[in-house]
Image: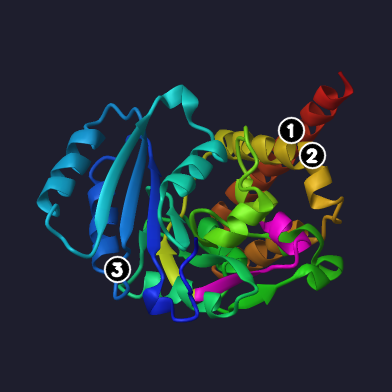
Amino acid sequence: METNTSDMSQAVVSVIIPTLNPGEQIITSLERCLEQTRRPDEIIVVDSASNDGTAERVQRFIDKHAKDPTTTIRFIPIQRQDFDHGATRDMALRESKGDFVLFLTQDALPADAHYIENILKPFADEHIAMVSGRQIPRPDARPSERLVRQFNYPAQSHVRSAKDIPAYGIKAFFATDVCSAYRRSAYLEVGGFEHPITTNEDMFIAAAFLYAGYSIAYDADAQVIHSHNFTWKQQYKRNYAMGREITKHQSLLRNAKVAGEGASLVKNVMSGLIKQHAFGELFWFVGDCAARLLGNRAGTAAAKRESAR
């Protein structure tokens, strides 16, 4: 039974971090969680058979903090072939005890000590089922990646509900499990993450929340440091998976229209690069956009072929 969360200080908060060969960064992540102004009651590391000593690192960390009265730290090992973006997170959430369950990826580090405090604030509204945080690019992020992050994760917070779907289309479901938080009761009410699934489990459950009458929030004050310098090949594969899953799950999105957000992003990034006189990066970004587009189209086509069988 869920705790009465009208007083958020009485709510139980869990943090879940899926890992695969995270190296020493998992220790940095755990330390950042324990440095929070609102410390979690529980941290669960779900590891996909890492072979870089992750199990030993985390166990030493658990032993070091075994007498900590505030936060319980657990390590759940799974076989690598059993990892699934939806099923693994669903298992971990159901294993957790939190009234509010936060997900972080292994390479997303809370930017300050107020991350958990800030990502929980929107839940003061009982209609909020999910909150996503803001991603701040790493110091080594290439110029185009910095501009992409700034476009996708702006400095302004917002809340979206079902009434916003006609205006925003599929963008109304924009959410990220890189840094997210869920109201447990709402999560269980809509049935949890789709699985098996290779990506976009966050988008599909965001849609489920909106269609169930809940709202989802983006809190710009809840910040993590996270970005990628993908190669064109990696970008193609990532967008192939996205295109395939979105097409396969159109019924969950109820055929919400695809707004012109992609074109807006490209225009914004290209304009920013021109202002910076970063013409070499502009050339690179054109190739990156081609990889995104071709990957998405190939994934979409693959999903349509699969459904026709």
Foreground residue among 150 and 126: 126
**Vertical position of residue 290 compared to residue 119: above or below:** above
**Vertical position of residue 120 compared to residue 108: above or below:** below
Residue 212 falls within the magenta-colored stretch: yes
Residue 248 falls within the magenta-colored stretch: no
* Residue 264 x/y as whole percent: 74, 64
Q: Secondary structure at mark 3?
A: loop
* Residue 84 x/y as whole percent: 53, 34
Q: Secondary structure at mark 2?
A: helix
Whichever of labels 3 and 2 marks the residue nearer the N terminus, that label is 3
In-image side of 293 versus 46 (left or right): right
Please name the colour scheme applied to the rendered image: rainbow
Tell me if label 1 and label 3 are in contact, CB under 8 Å. no
The answer to which quarter of the image holds residue 56 is: top left
The residue under the point 62% across, 32% down is 196
Residue ID for mark 1: 299
**Vertical position of residue 117 compared to residue 31: above or below:** below
Tell me if label 1 and label 2 are in contact, CB under 8 Å. yes
Residue ID for mark 3: 39
Q: Amino acid at mark 1?
A: Gly
Per the rendering, the mark at residue 247 is 2
Whichever of labels 1 and 3 marks the residue nearer the N terminus, that label is 3
Q: Secondary structure at mark 1?
A: helix
* Magenta part of the chain: 206-220
Foreground residue among 91 and 137: 91
